[in-house]
Amino acid sequence: MNTDRPLAAIVLAAGSGTRMKSDLHKVLHPIAGKPMLHHLADTLGALGVERTVVVVGARKEQVAASLADRDIVIAEQTEQLGTGHAVRQAHDALKGFSGDVLILYGDVPLVSAETMQAMVDRLRFGDDPRCVVLGFRPDDPAAYGRIVADGTGTIEKMVEYKDASEAERAVTLCNSGLMAARATDLFVLLDQIGNDNAAGEYYLPDIVMLPGQKSAVIETGAGEVAGVNSRAELARVEADWQQLRRAQAMADGATLIAPETVFFAHDTVLGRDVTVEPNVVFGPGVTIEDGAVIHAFSHLEGAHVKGGCSVGPYARLRPGSIMEEGAKVGNFVEMKKTVLGKGAKANHLTYLGDATVGAGANIGAGTITCNYDGWFKHKTEIGDGAFIGSNSALIAPVRIGRGAIVAAGSAVSRDVGDGDLRLVRGEQLVKPGWADRFNSSMRKKKEG
């Protein structure tokens, strides 16, 4: 087995995706918060692929823009003449490349690096198959093309469902469309296939049945090669991904009280002994460290929750939120671009934006950091051990000193020194008996 050859990938993404009924290119629709195409690109990066070519057609500018910061070449298929024709469009981008090539589909996003590597390993095996096809066995083979193979995985016949005999339709091994081939063979083989079919298209699988060297098949699970052509299929693939991720989280030592109600992003990190209650959503960029508890109906994105923290219920952590060890946010608390210090608490009905809150500080119910003046954002600093009374407005930029107290109902627009009390309230006026007289007068008018 030759393991020294370099590896390239061709990702086909030229379809118009009309069934999605979307202005966004099909392969840019997200699974777990990341575009389908980026799932593949990241997997290829982890596999060490040297060259990646994405073949596009309609809305090519969207795909190109999404990949602008990646070392990926865009090739264009101006006419939709089939998958074989699409792969040919990568010829110039791979000129001079003499390694192995994976052929993938941008709307089949969840193929693992292990499966890709298995395809390449089979291609490099001593019998040197012409190409390797990735097969699968769905619960309902439906109208998938069938693969007839011997006991060693050598393909004897590959046939489209409409052309298959009854015996061939009884075969459960189906063609996913994904392949691996040597670059030195691939384009030579593509030049030998024709388009003598009802659609007048050049079909990539036709290279398998050309005379000469036999091809091979390896198998994977149906979920790994699930394709997305509609919103319903997008939802099914998302559901499959979430189910696997939940199982992995629990296997890694997290407790999910109602797993089916928890939704992860592609990069969510959970530590050991984390507890996640029902109906929690993790957006991209969230890390939860050991022993933290995420209570029900909370939404987190771009947040770092350190060990022993408590979040929610009904809390929202937006990007840039950091909770230090043992910090707590309670019901209907929102944080954005804020550091909540070690052991600090904001238990109810609070907005903390563009702020730093010192260790052990207590933020009373209904407190707001007024961080936006209509033009710019400003910062609020709250010192260690400070106490902010309920229903206070901290008008940034402002600093509340260490151990300071802001009395309930205060609107604070100037800095408060360490250990000081700031009380900002209008004078209370009492008129004895006024309410009784008023109510009596109004009652007489109504009865009158």
Image (cartoon, grey):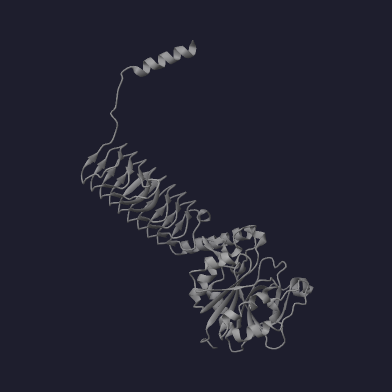
Percent position of residue 296, x then y: 46, 49
Q: Residue at x 53, y 66 (%)?
A: 65
Judged left or right of residue 191, residue 257 is left
Percent position of residue 378, x then y: 34, 50
Residue sticking out furthest to the front: 375
Above or below: residue 312 compared with residue 391: below
Above or below: residue 73 compared with residue 239: below
Q: Residue at x 44, y 15 (%)?
A: 442
Percent position of residue 393, x then y: 34, 41
Residue sticking out furthest to the top: 448
Percent position of residue 374, x then y: 40, 46
Q: Between residues 332 and 70, which one lies in front from this camera angle? A: 70
Q: Quadrant of the N terminus?
A: bottom right
Quick check: can you spot residue 405? yes
Above or below: residue 89 compared with residue 418: below
Q: Residue at x 63, y 86 (%)?
A: 185
Q: Between residues 383 and 292, which one lies in front from this camera angle? A: 383
Q: Quadrant of residue 411?
A: top left
Q: Between residues 174 and 87, which one lies in front from this camera angle? A: 87
